[in-house]
Amino acid sequence: MAAMLQRLWNSGPVRAVRAFAAHPLVQRSFVVLTLAVFAYAAWVGLTQAPPDREMGDVQRIMYAHVPMVQMMLLAGTITFVCSVLYLFRASWKTDALAEASAELALVFGAIGTTLGSIWGRPTWGVYWAWDPRLTTVAILLVALAGYLALRRFVDDPERRAVWAAVTGIVIAVDVPIIYFSVKWWKSLHQVQSSPRTVDPQMVHALRWNITAFFLVFIVFLVVRYRIALAARVREVTVPDAAPSRTTQAVAS
Amino acid sequence: MRLPGLVGSTWVLFRKDLLVEWRSRSRVNALVFFSLATLLLFSFALGPDTALLRRNAGGYLWLALLLASVLALGESFRVERENAALEGLRLIPVDARAIFLSKGLANAVLLTALGVLLVPVLVALFDVRVVLSWGRLLTLVGLGCLAIAAPGTLYGAIASHARARDVLLPLLLFPILIPALVAAAKGTTLVFEGDPMDQLPSWISLLGSFDLLYWGLGVVLFPRVVEE
């Protein structure tokens, strides 16, 4: 233990943090902490927060729906930033992070939208409404599916990385235009909830759930990033293991 | 020898693309009959309700153009793959931005011509009337086809080198084009049905902004897509 601390002390602050985070014990504790926070947040959301005056218990879906959609936005932003970074300076790390976050954006977005739809049925009377935000998210999810399909359909890792980065930027640029076009197309607007309009106990539950989903997001992202990076390293160093360059050269 | 500048090489390549198209005319023919068949299918799928068909004619026009565009864009890069023509162009060396601009413009011109050809068919099949001026309709068709061509050319270049390229191109392109589709279809419907609220300028400006953004983005990103 003392030797480890000594080594940390000698290696500079950034390296120290990285070495600390890379330690298996630290990582395992982080996962345990995530699970604990998640369980507590679910308990608060399901039992402690008051039921909504008009919507009743259905409103509790919000404690999962809102954080998941927020994580989708966060993941989408990470993909966009990584795509831009990759085009400026090619690195397998940004490419792997872009892939990991795009997948998470799709997963969190799809579940978040489904939850919102389940909530919408008893509240609005319909599963789906052509609201600008709803529609924008739905289009974004389809576009993300296309992005991930592109990654599956290109064998050469370098070309795949560049093309995926280009696609990531094109999709990200589209999001505000989609929002405005749908808004003009049909203006059925939802009033956005803010902490001022919501009961403090509900805010408490929502904050815990956002924290919990954020921790889950971090765990997923790190795990998926490592898998993506390992796959990339395998593709580049052992090309025979994956039919990449050689078949591409023959085909084109 | 002095190489031509960006505008010069774009013009030369643009003429080359149109010439290649004109020599065979196979793509134009296929596109015309494909989109005619699409328009017919819409009317059969929705029944013989003339009022309904007329009300939705603007949307059908853009759906037919959008479906045809996938064929046109895929074909425009298949031509370049034969005999590695694209690699040859890159070796001359031609500025990759000129390749994007010329290919995109050629695709836009082809689609606009198709759109112009489809309007009389709409008039005949769906009994639409051009209430506002023909100039506005032409502006909409032109801007809409430019909107399809810019991301379409970018994605066409990507998809032409990937596996399952016929599936990939629409999968990438359609979600991106939704704002352009909304603006173009709404605008065209206004031209056919009349525009009492004067909404047409805002749809045209939305389409114009979409064009500016994606043509700019294409010029910046395309060189990275085709680099070796």
Image (spheres, rainbow, N blue to C red):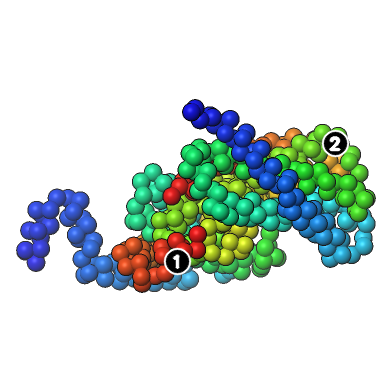
- Residue at left 32%, top 68%? A238
How far across and down, in percent of the image, does residue B90 sit?
49, 43
Q: Does residue A103 show up?
A: no
Say if labels 1 and 2 share a chain. Answer: no
Q: Residue furthest top?
A: B2
Give the image quarter of residue A155.
bottom left
Q: Residue furthest front?
A: B1
Q: Between residue B206 and residue B88, name the one nearer to us.
A: B88
Q: Which residue is mark 1?
A: A247
Q: How far is disc 1 from disc 2 in space, using C-alphas?
A: 52 Å
Q: Between residue A108 and residue A144, name the one nearer to us.
A: A144
Give the image quarter of residue B101.
top right
Up-down: is A205 above or below B101? below
- Residue at left 44%, top 61%? A249
How far across and down, in percent of the image, does residue A64 sit?
49, 65
Numbered tag placed on residue B134 in the rendering: 2
Q: Amino acid at mark 2?
A: Trp
Name the element at disc 2. helix
